[in-house]
Amino acid sequence: MAWITKNSATMEIERRDEPYLTDAMKAKLTADVLPRFPRKQAATLPALHEVQHAYDYIPHQALEEIAAFLELEPSVVMDTATFYEEFFLRPRGKYLIWVCQSLSCEIMGQPTLLEQISAKLDIEPGETTDDGKFTLMTAECLGSCGTAPVALVNEDLHENLTYDNFERVLDSLK
Amino acid sequence: MALDAPILTKRIPTPPFGDIADRKVVSYDQFVATGGYAGLDKAVSMTPAEVIDLVKASELRGRGGAGFPAGLKWSFLPPEDGGQRFLTVNADESEPGTFKDRLMLEFDPHLLLEGIAICMHACRLDTAYIYIRGEYHLQRKRVQAAIKEAYDNKIFGPGSKLGQINGRDPQCFDHRGAGAYICGEETGLIESLEGKRGWPRIKPPFPAVAGAFGRPTIINNVETLAMVGPIMVEGVDWFKSMGVARPEGAPPTVPASYGPKLFGISGLVNRPGVYEDQLGITLKELIEVHGQGMRNGKKFKGAIPGGISMGVLGPDQYEAGLDFDIGKKYACLGLGTAGAIVFDEDTDMVSVARNIARFFAHESCGQCTPCREGTGWMYKMLTRIEAGNGRTKDLDLLLEIAGSIGAMPGTTICGLADGANWAVRTIVNKYWDEFESRVKPTLVQVTVGS
Ligand SMILES: Cc1cc2nc3c(=O)[nH]c(=O)nc-3n(C[C@H](O)[C@H](O)[C@H](O)COP(=O)(O)O)c2cc1C
Ligand code: SF4
Ligand code: FES
């Protein structure tokens, strides 16, 4: 789980006039997602995924918009959003790298691999490169232990990693 | 003891029956052409109660970790009252060492959908949600495509083969998780489905009585449901001809370990992967036959039998039979997900314990103090021991903390803490000498003279 803390007292929410949760998104959620559940709150995860898919992260203003759309308090949506590792409440890089650090991957060489990736990108896990291209994260078991070590880059899983083959993957990304 | 023919992997080429390179996603038409949905046809020709009785008689046990008899679970539902009733399919697969459901979702999603439809008919459930972990992108897309085909072919939706259930057209949806191991715990999953943080609920009430949206809900693992179609077609005797019977003299209330099972194997073996075999094959067979032996001819040092929550099998437990009784016989928690992780002579067991403790500390949902704090302390202590700064008394403290957390000792809400408890305790106990050699003796203060 994610233990996200924020400085509530001094935090200012950046706002823009144009909504993040667009009418097109609302229409899609209304047609495809809301009818699936007896309660609107159940559309929280789908709505968060939708917003994150569009902007690569979930701005605070979008949390409020989702709350209004689902007839919830913003704090309720915030509560849910901060619980899940996959949701980013701050901007992240164009390519999100999740390196699995659980047991099968560790005994198959992940620690060295992570160090090398970290050195190449010159960032620690949790950080984003200055050019905004890569964010490096560690993940717990990605469910592909038979081809350890593995890493996800956005939605693509890369298996049987060595530093050389993974470096080629990273270099090929524009 | 090998299987005569593949069952769950019938359409997913897997050694020794097929070549992994030939794997392709199985479409609805290919599924039907190879006998698929025959189990559903058979089920809908029977009454719901007859289907439940058949699944009960097969003694099919849950494949998600706890091994609870599926038919029995299905019979716990209250009588229908016209309101909605749900099936939540557990495809959250996040237990380190486990990657078997992924195979079903990726290549033969209709085998799962067939099991879902049979379960909905038997239990009178009108809506199914397949809760798929957020990181399974390809698998999610494959399942979505299969669901669409199933609607087009009247498995679900208006005009479904199932008829109306609770006055509604039967529905099946995928639902995407967002990266939290705890959402695999059944009530954590339900909370997450409802749009909240995945905090497990105190039980009772059990989901069968008050689950999703406060309504009766059945929750089963992907592999459990995928097994139901073949059982409908081939029958109870066929299913029970595989696996291990209950121990001699045990009352019929003690469930046996029948049927085929997907076994995962990862770590230091030559051919890691998911293989199908009978329940009860030995760890030795799993490693030597399916895993093609230890890598680089190294010596076996131990293995996690089924996901890290189960603890460890030591160097002298190489012949352990992998069935649901493994826990009692070999001092581990159980068979779990049957996803083995194999260690060789070079594996540092202190690092293994540290890695596992970090996993639980990271994934603890934080509701119960013993779990939230205990897993964190264990991680810190093991990090210290690994760095050579531990003391002998730390080992005792480690065992004491580990032994005190969990739903079994009664200090926590869910089983995540039991997993941490068993994993750390069994590793420290079974590799005591290794741990002892890594810590400094505890200094005891003595008073000299007077
Ligand atoms: C911490 C925790 C995580 C779990 N994760 C999963 C999981 O990822 N997949 C799964 O099928 N069961 C998981 N389970 C077991 C479920 O709670 C539940 O027993 C299971 O889904 C029931 O299905 P079955 O009877 O078909 O096995 C987990 C349990 C606990 C305590
Ligand atoms: S045992 Fe741990 S994971 Fe389970 S409910 Fe309690 S704090 Fe959460
Ligand atoms: S341990 Fe890395 S994918 Fe499972």
Image: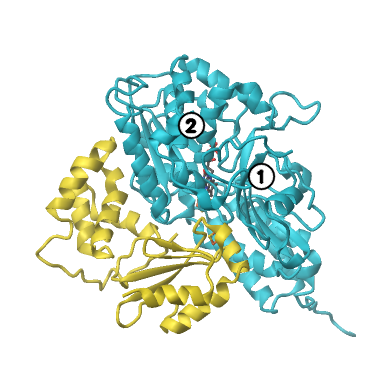
* Residue B335, numbered circle: 1
Disc 2 target residue: B34
* Residue B118, numbered circle: none
Q: Amino acid at mark 2?
A: Thr
CA separation in Å, label 1 and label 2 = 31 Å
Q: Are marks 1 and 2 on the same chain?
A: yes
**Which hue belongs to chain B?**
cyan
**Which hue belongs to chain A?**
yellow
Residue B101 shown left or right of residue A104 in the figure: left
Of marks 1 and 2, which one's residue comes earlier in the chain?
2
Asked which secondary structure carries label 1, the reply is loop
**Category of crowding for the residue at label 2, using alpha-carbon neighbours closer than 10 angstroms: few (below 14), some (14–19), many (at least 20):** few
Residue B102: x and y in percent read: 49, 49
Asked which secondary structure carries label 2, the reply is loop
Residue farthest to the left, as pictured = A17
Question: Within the image, what quadrant is residue A11 found in?
Answer: bottom left
Question: Within the image, what quadrant is residue A136 found in?
Answer: bottom left
